Amino acid sequence: MSGGITRREFVVGASALGGVLCLMSSSAMAVPFAGRADPEVLLFDPDHPDACRKVAEQAGGCATLAVTGDRVRFASEFFSGAAAPARVAGVTSYSDYVLLSGCAAERGYRVVAEEARGPLVQWKVERRATSK
């Protein structure tokens, strides 16, 4: 053991923290996309039928992209670079939400909305404004 935190310990801790945050969420989080600018891209889990249905209902003209393959590699490539969108929404499993939002945070994004509904989490991240 190197004394550092393992990936499994990180995911367990993040899951516990996320569960607490979901329980503590206020009624303002009831409509996660209300009062904010529309997302530029909507990420979703193509293997989950409910996610596909929600994407069909909520896409509203923004681009949609299925989350495929290794989630960490997908997020690292998606959120890096100058062409990364400023606002991203997602309809994914909770574990995918933790990984994707964590990778987004490493690249200057912050979670502005999250709502757990059954096995899915609807979430939204925005790039932090840079101070000049």
Image: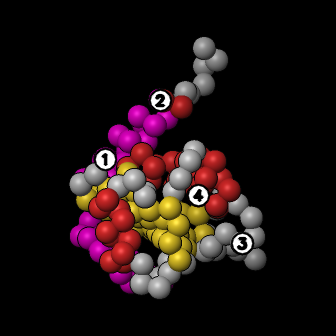
> Which mark lies nearer to you, 3 or 1?
3
8 shown above or below 15: above
Q: Which residues are magenta?
A: 9-37
Q: CA distance from mark 3 to mark 1?
A: 32 Å
Disc 2 marks which amino acid?
Glu
Q: Please tell me whether mark 3 sits on a helix, a strand or a loop.
A: loop
Left or right: where 104 falls relative to 51: right
| Disc on the earlier residue, 4 or 3 | 3
Q: CA distance from mark 2 to mark 1?
A: 15 Å
| Disc on the earlier residue, 2 or 4 | 2
Q: CA distance from mark 2 to mark 4?
A: 20 Å
| Disc on the earlier residue, 3 or 1 | 1
**Residue displayed at 47% across by 85% down:** 61
- Residue 4 sits inside the magenta stretch: no
Q: Which residue is mark 1?
A: 19
Disc 3 marks which amino acid?
Ala
Left or right: where 66 falls relative to 18: right
Q: CA distance from mark 4 to mark 3?
A: 14 Å
46 shown above or below 12: below
- Residue 10 sits inside the magenta stretch: yes
Q: Mark number for residue 9?
A: 2
Q: CA distance from mark 4 to mark 1?
A: 19 Å
Can residue 114 be seen here?
no
Q: Residues within 10 Å of mark 2 (few under 14, many from 20)?
A: few
> Which mark lies nearer to you, 4 or 3?
3
Disc 1 marks which amino acid?
Gly
| Disc on the earlier residue, 4 or 1 | 1
Q: Please tell me whether mark 1 sits on a helix, a strand or a loop.
A: helix
Q: Magenta region's main secondary structure?
A: helix
